[in-house]
Each structure stands twice: as structure tokens, then as C-alpha cells.
């Protein structure tokens, strides 16, 4: 991994040389100064205050010693170790990003540590009776040191953020795959993966199946909230929505806009452990949308079309029901069959009320009575049987939906 070399812009003034023996004196005091700087940082920066946090303590100590070493090397004008020291702070910044933390604490530690170290160096300079130009030179070198380590940490943090985002996305896709498996999933496994993906585990979810686009472009990616789990690579693309009926309610024009106009079906809200079932219904609804049996455009909620989804859950069985229940209509012509089927469904849905059936069909009640007499000749007394009526409603409803199916389907 390439680590950028910190860039220091000189002030343009001539800096007096610092006595070489001062560097050796400060190097001899390095551990003592590091102790004081470390304590000051722990007192001033809450993130480094807990003595029980071993990782923070080790990183803090390493950072302090590294920065002080860089400062002394600048005094002796020894640039040989600058790259290695910059790499240390680069890795510190990168580690902060990968842990999902802010860079503020590390930058505060650099500033506070640098200021306190300068106080200690100033005290030594005063004890040695150094001239003010030399003290000013030391101050400029101290500023240069703080600038370089802060710049290296920021560069590492920026690189770590990119890697962290990629890793987080990978973990969330893995979590989504786990949740949408047909096999039962251990709750502990879900909790563990969710923790690593920084995803609060909801009680209920709904899964969205989206119509696939001919090509995947970043500008077509749905603008869903941070809590949604998205997989645009699957076929069809899918989105898991947490708490769909609660605070995370999804729907309406805003959600359709977030999907950038792409047709989609939202599966029923289910407990998290049953997410695969919500996906299954969403995919089935999307297929019926493509066939024209369900509305083809916009965002469709499966919860609003449960009877249609149930009716088409087993196509071969539905065909058997239609063939058996509507067999008497095979005796009439195709045109007459369509009129009689339409009238029979309207009459059954109207509770055998002729006037209501006529209003549904926008025809005269006498026309309904005429057609009912024809139907009674075809079906006989079975029209009064409750079981037969239910079969007829289901079969006629399926036939009416099929009439809207696109020819290419």
C-alpha cells in the first residue's frame, strides 16, 4: 500500500540551525516526555481516557513516541525515517476509519499532544538558556511535525473510509443472502452478522422485488434509506425494508420516486425469520405484473392483492378449477360465453341482486335477468349450492384476470 509523503510548505524565512547536542538531549528524555504527553492526552481527550482499553493505550503510546521521534529527527535534519513515521500515522488514521469512528479524537490527540510536547521542549530550552531565534526554530519544527503526522493520519483515514464502505456493503449483502434463504437461520447467526454490518435487527420486514433493468447504472440505483438492505445484482433485484408498517413505513409516491420509476412489488410484512416468504410473494406478484394480471406500472403492495396471489399460487390447479367449474359454458359460443361469464360473476359478487349486478355491468336489469335464465339452463340447481358458488367466483375471477394478460405472456 502506497503511503503519501507529507508535504510541508516552508515559510520562506531562514531558520537558524538548532544545536545538534540538543537533539541528543531530547532523544535521551524521549520516554519521560512521552509519559507526560500521553497523560495530558488521556486527560484531555475522552476517547483515550480509559486505562482499561489496551488497544487505545498502545496506539496512543506508539503515536506519541513516533511523533516525538520525528520531531527530534527534524532537529538533526535526518529525513531517513520520515516515510516510516508517516506510515505509522497513516495506519492509525486508516484503523480509525475501519472501526467506524470519527477522526476527531485522533486529530485532537495530535494537537493536544503537540502543544504539550512543545511546552516541555520550551522548558528545556529555557533551562539551557537558548537564544530566541533557536527557540523560534524549534517552534517551527514542532509545527511541522504536527502538520505532517496530522496529514498522514487524514490520508489514512480517507483510504480507510473507502475500504470501510466497501466492507460494510459486502457484509450487508451477505446478511441479506442469509435472511432470504429458504432454510431456517439461527437467530444468533443473524445477530452476529447484523452487528458486523451495523444493522439494527427489526422485528418485521418486507422484501421488494424490482423489475430488472437492461443495464445496471449507478444513477438508476434506488434511493432507499440507510436501514434497507439492497442487492441490485440478483435477478430480480431485491430490497429488504425494516419495520415497513411502523416508523420505517414505505409506500406512496415518495417510495416510487425513490425507486426511480422502476416497477416493483412489495411483499407482505412478516417476522424477520420469514423474510424469504415475503420475497417469494413479491417475486410472484412481479411476475403477474409482467403478464398484465396485476397492474404493470408503479409500486404494487402484495397486501392489497392477496386473493389474486392466492388464486395464482398454483397455476395448474387453477386451470383444473376453471375447467371443472366453468364446463357448462363450453356449450355456448365464445362471444356468448364472455357475456354470460361476466354477468354470472357480477351476480355472484352482488349477492344474487339483479339491480346491483346490472349497475356493476352498466346494463339494464332486464338484460341481466335474460342472461340469468340462460345460465340456469346451463348450470341447473348447482347455482344455489354455496360450494359451487365459491368455485365459480374463483374460476370466473381467474378468467377475468386472464383476459387482461398480455398476449406475449
Image (spheres, grey):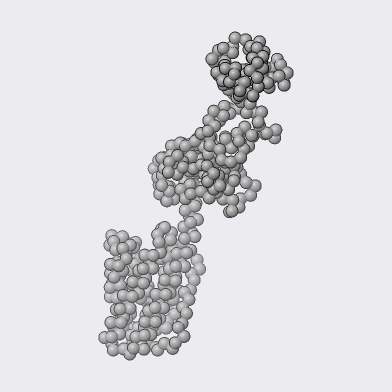
Q: Position of residue 178 (x, y in %)?
A: 47, 43
Identify the image quadrant of the C terminus.
top right
Q: Position of residue 341 (x, y in %)?
A: 65, 20
* Left or right, residue 335 beside residue 318: right
Q: Is residue 190 visible?
A: no
Residue shown at 36% from the left, 68% from the top: 108
Residue shown at 54% from the left, 28% from the top: 307
Q: Quadrant for residue 90, please give it.
A: bottom left
Residue 265 to residue 89: above or below: above
Q: Nearer the viewer, residue 220 or 176?
A: 220
Q: Quadrant for residue 184, please give it.
A: top left
Q: Nearer the viewer, residue 288 or 183?
A: 288
Q: Is residue 56 visible?
A: yes
Q: Position of residue 3 (x, y in %)?
A: 48, 69
Q: Position of residue 357 (x, y in %)?
A: 60, 20
Q: Residue furthest left?
A: 127
Number of marks = 0
* Left or right, residue 48 beside residue 387: left
* Left or right, residue 200 beside residue 35: right
Amino acid at each position: 500500500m502506497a503511503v503519501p509523503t507529507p508535504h510541508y510548505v516552508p515559510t520562506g524565512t531562514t531558520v537558524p540551525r538548532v544545536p545538534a547536542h540538543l537533539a541528543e538531549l531530547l532523544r535521551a528524555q524521549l520516554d519521560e516526555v512521552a509519559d507526560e504527553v500521553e497523560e495530558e492526552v488521556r486527560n484531555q481527550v475522552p476517547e483515550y481516557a480509559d486505562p482499561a482499553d489496551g488497544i487505545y493505550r498502545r496506539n496512543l503510546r506508539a503515536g506519541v513516541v513516533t511523533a516525538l521521534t520525528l520531531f527530534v529527527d527534524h532537529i538533526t535534519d535526518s529525513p531517513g525515517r520520515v516515510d516510516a513515521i508517516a506510515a505509522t500515522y497513516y495506519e492509525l488514521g486508516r484503523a480509525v476509519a475501519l472501526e467506524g469512528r470519527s477522526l476527531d479524537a485522533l486529530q485532537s490527540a495530535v494537537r493536544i499532544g503537540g502543544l504539550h510536547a512543545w511546552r516541555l521542549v520550551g522548558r528545556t530550552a529555557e533551562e539551557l538558556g537558548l537564544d530566541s531565534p533557536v527557540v523560534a526554530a524549534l517552534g517551527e519544527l514542532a509545527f511541522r511535525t504536527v502538520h505532517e503526522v496530522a496529514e498522514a493520519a487524514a490520508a489514512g483515514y480517507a483510504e480507510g473510509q473507502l475500504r470501510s464502505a466497501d466492507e460494510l456493503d459486502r457484509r450487508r449483502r451477505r446478511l441479506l443472502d442469509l435472511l432470504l434463504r429458504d432454510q431456517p437461520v439461527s437467530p444468533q447467526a443473524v445477530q452476529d452478522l447484523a452487528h458486523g454490518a451495523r444493522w439494527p435487527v427489526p422485528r418485521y420486514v418486507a422484501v421488494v422485488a424490482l423489475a430488472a433493468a437492461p443495464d445496471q447504472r449507478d444513477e438508476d440505483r434506488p434511493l432507499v434509506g440507510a436501514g434497507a438492505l439492497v442487492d441490485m445484482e440478483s435477478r430480480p433485484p431485491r430490497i429488504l425494508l425494516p419495520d415497513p408498517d411502523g416508523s420505517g413505513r414505505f409506500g406512496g409516491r415518495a417510495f416510487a420516486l425513490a425507486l426511480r420509476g422502476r416497477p416493483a412489488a412489495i411483499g407482505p410484512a412478516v417476522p424477520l425469520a420469514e423474510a424469504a416468504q415475503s420475497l417469494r410473494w413479491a417475486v410472484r406478484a412481479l411476475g403477474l405484473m409482467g403478464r398484465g394480471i396485476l397492474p404493470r406500472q408503479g409500486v404494487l403492495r402484495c397486501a392489497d392483492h392477496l386473493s389474486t396471489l392466492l388464486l395464482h399460487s398454483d397455476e395448474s390447479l387453477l386451470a383444473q378449477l376453471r375447467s371443472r367449474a366453468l364446463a357448462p359454458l363450453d356449450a355456448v359460443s365464445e362471444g356468448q360465453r364472455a357475456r354470460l361469464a361476466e354477468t354470472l360473476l357480477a351476480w355472484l359478487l352482488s349477492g344474487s341482486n339483479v339491480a346491483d349486478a346490472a349497475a356493476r355491468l352498466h346494463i339494464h336489469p332486464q338484460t341481466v335477468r335474460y342472461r340469468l335464465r340462460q345460465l340456469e339452463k346451463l348450470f341447473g340447481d348447482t347455482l344455489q349450492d354455496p360450494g359451487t358458488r365459491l368455485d365459480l367466483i374463483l374460476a370466473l375471477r381467474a378468467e377475468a384476470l386472464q383476459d387482461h394478460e398480455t398476449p406475449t405472456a
